[in-house]
Amino acid sequence: MAAQGEGAPARAKSEQFDAVIVGAGFAGMYMLHRLRGLGLTARVFEAGVGVGGTWYWNRYPGARCDVESLEYQYGFSDEVQRGWTWSERYAAQPEILRYQNYVADKLDLRRDMRFETRVTSATYDEHTGLWTVETDKGDSVSARFCIMATGCLSAARVPDFEGLEDFQGDWYHTGGWPHEGVDFSGKRVAVIGTGSSGIQSIPVIAAQAAHMTVFQRTANFTLPAGNRPLTQGEIARSKETLLEDRKHARETPGGIICFEYNETLAGDLTPEARERELDTRWNQGGFAFLGAFGDLMATHEANDIAADFAREKMRASVKNPDVVEKLLPFDHPVGVKRLCLDTDYLQTFDQPHVDLVDVRETPVERISKKGVVCGGREYEADAIVFATGFDAMTGALLAIDVTGRGGAKLKEKWAAGPRTYLGLGSAGFPNLFFITGPGSPSVLSNMIVSIEQHVDWITDCVKRLTDGNIRSIEPTREAEDAWVSHVNELASETLYPQANSWYMGANIPGKPRVFMPYTGGVNVYGEKLAEVAAADYEGFRLGA
Ligand code: FAD
Ligand code: NAP
């Protein structure tokens, strides 16, 4: 395997390409491959030292996928998939990163990538029809197409706790974990945050630490992942059917085929049948649980049945009577915050060296030299782990100073919430594409399926423009307004907006509260994408 960035030609400060791609995660890697297939030139800029995106940055102990490995992989090439064999049902971060590096090697992607380079601005010139992209390394390159593969969960966020700079121990964010790993042996560790990252890392860190204090603001629904080695039979079957499976995945709401959604409404099932359905799905592990009834994500009546079931299962997993009730979520419907999949998370709180501090009523006040202060008490720690999440969906994108037609700033346009047509583009910003942007299924789906759906669509669109000698494409205001309303309306028919989730931007003080992803499903969305393209990009304005 080639070392990251090895063999890269000397940096030229001012170059021109057909396209600039920002980000070298799953999205940026596949986008580069497809543009090369059109015979176009492209430059990828990536802030990290290597490819991988999420899996490059999130190296915390216990990190693994929550969509099964056999589905959480590229599905565009039989040759690529046949050369790789997954070991576990839910691959751990090092294995996923090795897979991404395997793909980068196989497709020889790195020669068009510049690592350790952060894009700072992207500016559209109406006269030349080109984007100028600038980086923190002093590059200024121009390109006809600017493609943001910046990731929905790539802007890690440490809350603005007073006193952090004076903390005498070490601190880490799960989304920017040291490459050399961290040895917590003999240490007192404080973990703040109990979302997916906290729930995955807490049991593993607790196994090493001398003492652990977990600060929980919101108890989350979590169910056993049921991770295990894959069988030879599963691996062999997947190698035969992956490409076909991927086609099916696009015909499902979540881009996942390892379970089916039950369309029957909860009220149409007997209590025994409901219990059986929930139990089977709980034992299956993964997101199957949320597909138990047709109205599980739409009505409180149906959702309460599943939530009660989940709480009972969770309650039965903890023996410690001092903490069990605190670990149960009562303040939001199940599934409206990302369902967590765990390995022995709840059982961790039965260990005598692990304490749970509920910070819902008494928030973390500050970080002191010696630890975390809340409720007027100081909890001493040698290390603090912030599992506090991300400025999701818009954070990485808006950290770039994006300027469109007439000097319009994307950040200003999106001040009250993101405005896109199909999650792919925004009016006033010609030839600018977002991969899995707000307004598309993205984070509500198997992300690799959604990434491939977007990259394929963008590739066809770029081909249409280059073949047809068309200078630019951008959404019309009308199409964008209608799409934003549609996305909001669909979300309002679900229970999703009823939680303080990162889907809503609620985890970032001051961020507008707007439900950002499209809830209609990958399948319905895919049909819309196809219709738009077939009608020669209806809703977009094609510039001569
Ligand atoms: P990313 O992988 O986030 O890559 C974006 C890249 O862009 C990053 O490397 C970043 O450094 C770079 N970048 C951003 N801004 C700039 C800039 N200005 N200049 C240069 N580079 C920039 N999804 C699932 O479907 N299933 C899962 O099991 C799953 N597990 C996850 C586990 C964790 C811990 C996290 C955080 C997310 C998980 N996700 C999962 C979501 C995950 O983000 C996607 O599945 C997928 O990896 C996203 O790929 P991407 O290429 O779109 O973005
Ligand atoms: P997250 O879901 O946003 O969780 C952050 C946690 O930190 C929450 O418990 C939050 O509490 C808490 N928090 C934030 N600010 C706080 C403060 N000031 N004081 C106290 N607590 C605070 O972030 P994440 O766990 O990193 O996960 C983000 C997403 O990444 C997931 O939803 C998932 O999509 C993906 N992911 C997937 C996996 C996987 O299983 N494959 C693993 C990790 C991440 P509140 O809930 O009260 O805000």
Image (spheres, rainbow, N blue to C red):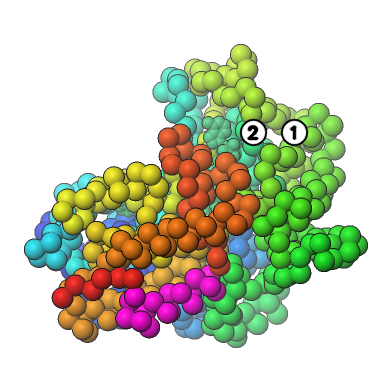
Mark carried by residue 216? 2
Q: Residue furthest left?
A: 127
Give x and y (percent) for residue 330.
Answer: 73, 40
Give the residue displayed 79% in from the left and 62% down from the top: 266
- Contact, mark 2 vs mark 1 (Cβ under 8 Å): yes
At label 1, the amino acid type is: Lys
Give x and y (percent) for residue 463.
Answer: 27, 80
Mark carried by residue 477? none
Magenta-highlighted residues: 522-538
Q: Report crowding for label 2: few under 14, some 14 to 19, many 20 or more residues within 10 A (C-alpha).
A: many
| Alpha carbons under labels 2 and 1: distance apart | 9 Å
Q: Quadrant of the N terminus?
A: bottom left
Give x and y (percent) for residue 131.
Answer: 18, 61
Q: Which residue is mark 1?
A: 326
- State yes or no: residue 104 in magenta: no
For marks 2 and 1, the one nearer the N-term is: 2
The answer to whether the residue bearing label 2 lies less than 8 angstroms from the nearest atom of ligand 2 is: yes
Closer to the camera, 164 or 205? 164
At label 2, the amino acid type is: Gln
Badge 1 element: helix
The answer to whether the residue bearing label 1 lies less than 8 angstroms from the nearest atom of ligand 2 is: no
Judged by its main secondary structure, the magenta piece is helix
Give x and y (percent) for residue 106.
Answer: 40, 75
- State yes or no: residue 529 in magenta: yes
Q: Report crowding for label 1: few under 14, some 14 to 19, many 20 or more residues within 10 A (C-alpha).
A: some
Lateral position of residue 10 relative to residue 327, left or right: left
Ligand 2 is found in the corner quadrant, namely top right
* Residue 421, quarter of picture: bottom left
Q: Quadrant of the C terminus?
A: bottom left
